[in-house]
Image (tube, grey):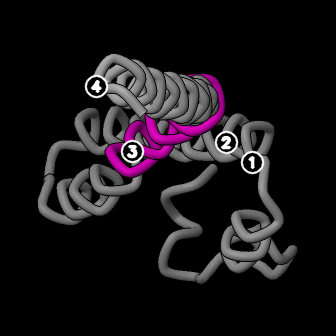
Amino acid sequence: MTIRKKVLVGFIVLLCLLLLASTISLFLMGKIGNKAEEINTNWMPSVLVLGDLDEDITNLPMIISQIGLETDLDKINALEVQVNNALKDIEQKRAEYEKLISSDEEKKSTAVFQPTGKPMPSKFRPYCK
């Protein structure tokens, strides 16, 4: 075998390896693109709704404690309206989040927080008209 044939065979082998590596890279980048699309269309809306829900849930005890500290009846009534609005927002965002649930695992983990039909604890009843 001459040097020319050896160089040609080596070049062809390198070219085949380069084509193989390129094909594998393109295939894996396609999978990454599909995952990114799934995250963008499926998971990010859920995360945004959960962030809003977390904010509402976090603010609720603060508003309730303000009611306990307030002495002006008009301000107490205004705070009660805020509590009722916050509870409505929480329920609305919970329902919105339920529509975005896509996996069985997520359904199982959120089932714990579903309304049970049991009466609201008595300590919250005065604030929820």
State the separation of the CA atoms marked 4 and 2: 69 Å
Q: Position of residue 32 (x, y in %)?
A: 51, 33
Name the N-terminal-most of marks 3 and 2. 3
Q: Are marks 4 and 2 in contact (CB under 8 Å)?
A: no
What stretch of residues is rendered in magenta? 39-55
Q: Position of residue 118 (x, y in %)?
A: 81, 81
Q: Residue at x 60, y 34 (%)?
A: 31
Which amino acid type corresponds to the residue marked 2 in the rendered image?
Answer: Tyr
Give the residue number, with chain letter if any, for mark 1. 101
Which amino acid type corresponds to the residue marked 4 in the rendered image?
Answer: Ile
Q: Residue at x 51, y 70 (%)?
A: 124
State the separation of the CA atoms marked 3 and 4: 76 Å
Instruction: Classify 70 as above or below 122.
Output: above
Direction from residue 40 to residue 79 in the image, left or right: left
Which SS class for mark 4?
helix
Q: How many marks?
A: 4
Q: Position of residue 105 (x, y in %)?
A: 74, 70
Direction from residue 117 to residue 98 in the image, left or right: left
User: Local crowd at mark 3 within 10 Å, few (<14), some, or many (≥20)?
Assistant: some
State the separation of the CA atoms marked 3 and 2: 14 Å
Which amino acid type corresponds to the residue marked 1 in the rendered image?
Answer: Ile
Q: Overall secondary structure of the magenta stretch?
A: helix
Q: Nearer the viewer, residue 20 or 100?
A: 20
State the separation of the CA atoms marked 3 and 1: 20 Å
Q: Nearer the viewer, mark 2 or mark 1?
A: 1
Q: Where residue 56 is drawn, which disc sits there? A: 3
Q: Residue at x 32, y 41 (%)?
A: 79
Which amino acid type corresponds to the residue marked 3 in the rendered image?
Answer: Asp
